[in-house]
Image: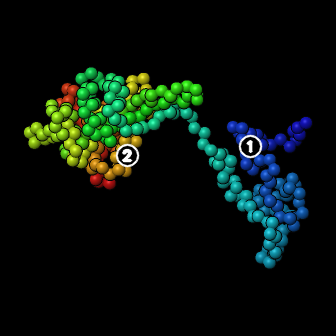
Amino acid sequence: MSDQSNYNPSDDPINGLKPLSNGDGFSLPIASHDGLRSHDFSEAIMANGLPLEETDEDDDDEEVDEDYVAVDHDDLNEYPYWLRRPPVRQRSKLDDLYPFVQVLTESNVDDCVLVEEAFPEQERCSREKFIYRLGRCPELCLGLFTLPILSEDEPKPRPTLVGHIIATRTASPYVTDKAMELPADWQTNRSTMVDGEIVGHDETGRSIAIHSLAVLREHQGKHVGSTLMKAYIQRIREAAIADRIVIIAHDHLVPFYQSFGFENRGPSKCQFGGGGWTDLVLEFSAE
Ligand SMILES: CC(C)(COP(=O)(O)OP(=O)(O)OC[C@H]1O[C@@H](n2cnc3c(N)ncnc32)[C@H](O)[C@@H]1OP(=O)(O)O)[C@@H](O)C(=O)NCCC(=O)NCCS
């Protein structure tokens, strides 16, 4: 039978957990000399935690009982149970993908061609360009994959590429049309120069030019793009392999890139895909 007279709402479980201070078998230590049983103790103290009874005028000379543990009740009140319990976090759409990021290689060309369909046709990177870029500088190309959790007897599927970042190096402080081009002789020549500028990937360039950030249409709006971009920036920054990351974007995405620290440098000279781009730069050399 329950005793309603002893009911205390703070004893109620919260998310299946009982408040620590009311946990089974847990009671605050009490000085043995106060002669009180534990269930009497709450009635014998005032709100500020000082005992009403047996006030000892000779506090300074009092012999300290070894079992005595000083409890600052005010302090306890400052750290209520609500602040100490683990944070409750809603699963996000991104969590549901069980995402992981990994460097891309030539084995991912077909996956990238599929993800690139996120762009309007005239802005897409061709299959040949993917073979070139993933072959020349895979370390600058990052993918976010999803792999569903399966039971032990199910065969492990190939991870699905959900989003990618494809980049090459350039000596220019901005993305240029030449950096975006595919060198005509890329299959036979390591490096191609036209009008004094390297076409395509420039191995010695100190700028990393992102040519594509794209997310599969069905997975857009789940923070895949922003998570991938943050992971990419962190990798490049920590590896200290470049002075800056540069990208071109249409106006509506400028705030998206600014949120990662890119600076708006105004209209780009790039005419790729019909032009109308803005230059964005994330400088590491200034850090
Ligand atoms: C742009 C793109 C990469 C963004 O990836 P995503 O996973 O859909 O974006 P996220 O969910 O990470 O978005 C994060 C924030 O960016 C902003 N954002 C995303 N897409 C945007 C868009 N198309 N226009 C304006 N803002 C956008 C939103 O403010 C969003 O914040 P919110 O979720 O709090 O509203 C993706 O939509 C895409 O592949 N688009 C087509 C290809 C493209 O245009 N690439 C960019 C080349 S410069």
Residue at (79%, 66%) from the top-left corner? Answer: 68
Instruction: Left or right? Give the position of 79 relative to 122.
Output: right
- Label 2 element class: helix
Q: Quadrant of residue 131?
A: top left
Q: Where residue 169 appears, x then y in whole percent?
A: 24, 42
Q: Which residue is mark 2?
A: 235
Q: Earlier in the sequence, mark 1 or mark 2?
A: 1
Q: Quadrant of the N terminus?
A: top right
Is the residue 210 above or below the residue 25 in the image?
above
Instruction: Left or right? Give the position of 45 relative to 107.
Output: right
Q: Where residue 266 appears, x then y in whole percent?
A: 23, 39
Residue at (38%, 29%) from the top-left corner? Answer: 215
> Furthest residue to the left?
195
Q: Which residue is mark 1?
A: 18
Of residues 41 and 50, which is closer to you in this image?
41
Q: Amino acid at mark 2?
A: Arg
Of residues 102 and 93, which is closer to you in this image?
102
Q: Quadrant of residue 102?
A: top left
